[in-house]
Image (spheres, rainbow, N blue to C red):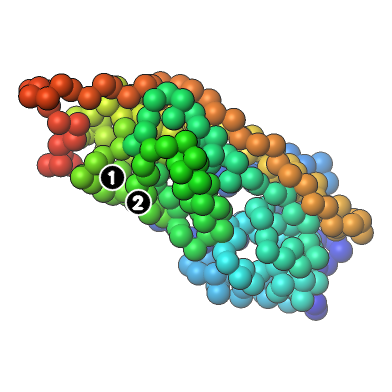
Amino acid sequence: MRGQQPGSAAIGMAFLRSAAGVDPFYSEVIAGMEDVLHRRGMRVLMQTVPTLDDELVVYRRWSENATVAGVVVSDLTVGDPRGALLAHLGIPHVTLGEPEDAAGGAVVRVDNYTTSVRAVEELVRLGHRSLGRVSGPLQLTHTQARAAAFEDAIASLGGTLITAVGDYSATSGAAAITELLESPQPPTAVVFDNDVMAVAGLATAQERGLSVPDDLSIVAWDDSTLCRLATPPLSVMSHDVRQLGLLAAHALLAIVDGGEAQDVTAPLSTFVARGSTAAPRPAPPLGSDREPRATPSAPAYP
């Protein structure tokens, strides 16, 4: 059987497997989807896979078994094959992000470029000129959009930028901030591409003897509960992630119900200042005995 079964009571969403489990971002997306789907007697079928190729296999199996009424696609890559395959299989789909080709599906656009520029503007406004960034995987199109925005904003506003690459896990966030702090000119502020890495980065900085925000400012990305429970609470580029799931569910159900594919844009993120950001501490005078900002021998995040 090709395509979805009209009576299917599930919307599928597949994720690349992580040792840390599902990112809080996607937990909130799914919660927003369920707010809509529950009223229709539908549910979210979540599947973790080790590779993108395995995700394509899952879609083919879902099609053969008429398992889902539609699919939500996220974490786009350059030349992403998923939309085209889903269109070929006849499965309605909605893409979160900025697809090169929506392949007949709906789109919920997320403006990562403008959000990244705003993050740089806020830190520059505080007086930071040496910025660090801990990115997600480089093959993701939203990582690339953020990278371009950071570089453009730094070039426009003045300052320097150093980037370390993570994979959204706590371990990679700890390793990345260690890399930044041990660079010849460590940043005075660091922006993380997700909350899990930011919380791990905060813990690592503190273990190294740094005071946040006196010695180092930290900005997280999505404003999950992790950020608000951290000590100090993390400043964020905040957006309503649950609303993103709600928009995705509505756009997908419109196609399932026989309507036209929608192309909507999620609200822009806003900067929320909490206890992890402040103006940079003035540089010590020449000859000062003040301790260095980082102590490389301190332990990393477990």
- Confirm whether residue 39 shows in the render: yes
Residue found at x 59% / y 30%: 270
Q: Position of residue 164 (x, y in %)?
A: 35, 51
Residue 23 visible somewhere in the drawing: no
Q: Secondary structure at mark 2?
A: strand
Give the residue displayed 77% in from the left and 71% down from the top.
87
- Crowd rating for badge 1 (residues with CA inside 10 Å; few <14, some 14–19, many 20+): many
> What amino acid does circle 2 point to?
Ala
Q: Is residue 9 above or below residue 112?
A: below
Q: Quadrant of residue 291?
A: top left
- Residue 258's x, y, as percent? 92, 59
Q: Position of residue 33 (x, y in %)?
A: 71, 45
Q: What is the secondary structure assignment of the residue under circle 1?
A: helix
The label number, if any, that marks residue 276 in the structure image: none
Which quadrant is the N terminus positioned in? Answer: bottom right
**Looking at the image, is 2 positioned above or below residue 18?**
below
Q: Is residue 298 left or right of residue 161?
A: left
Question: Which residue is identified by label 2?
Answer: 164
- As rendered, which of 131 and 190 lies closer to the eye? 131
- Name the residue furthest right: 258
State the image coordinates of residue 8 (x, y, percent, origin top left). 80, 61
Q: Tell me the kind of residue under disc 1.
A: Leu
How far is disc 2 from disc 1 in space, using C-alphas? Answer: 7 Å
**2, 222: nearer the viewer:** 222
Q: Which mark is residue 180?
A: 1
Q: In the rendered view, would you say 182 is above or below 118?
A: below
Q: Mark 2 near mark 1, Cβ–Cβ under 8 Å?
A: yes
- Answer with mark 2 or mark 1, whichever residue precedes in sequence: 2
Q: Residue at x 69, y 44 (%)?
A: 245
Task: Tell me what residue is drawn at x 27 percent, y 26 percent.
Answer: 215
Quadrant housing the C terminus:
top left
Q: Residues within 10 Å of mark 2 (few under 14, many from 20)?
A: some
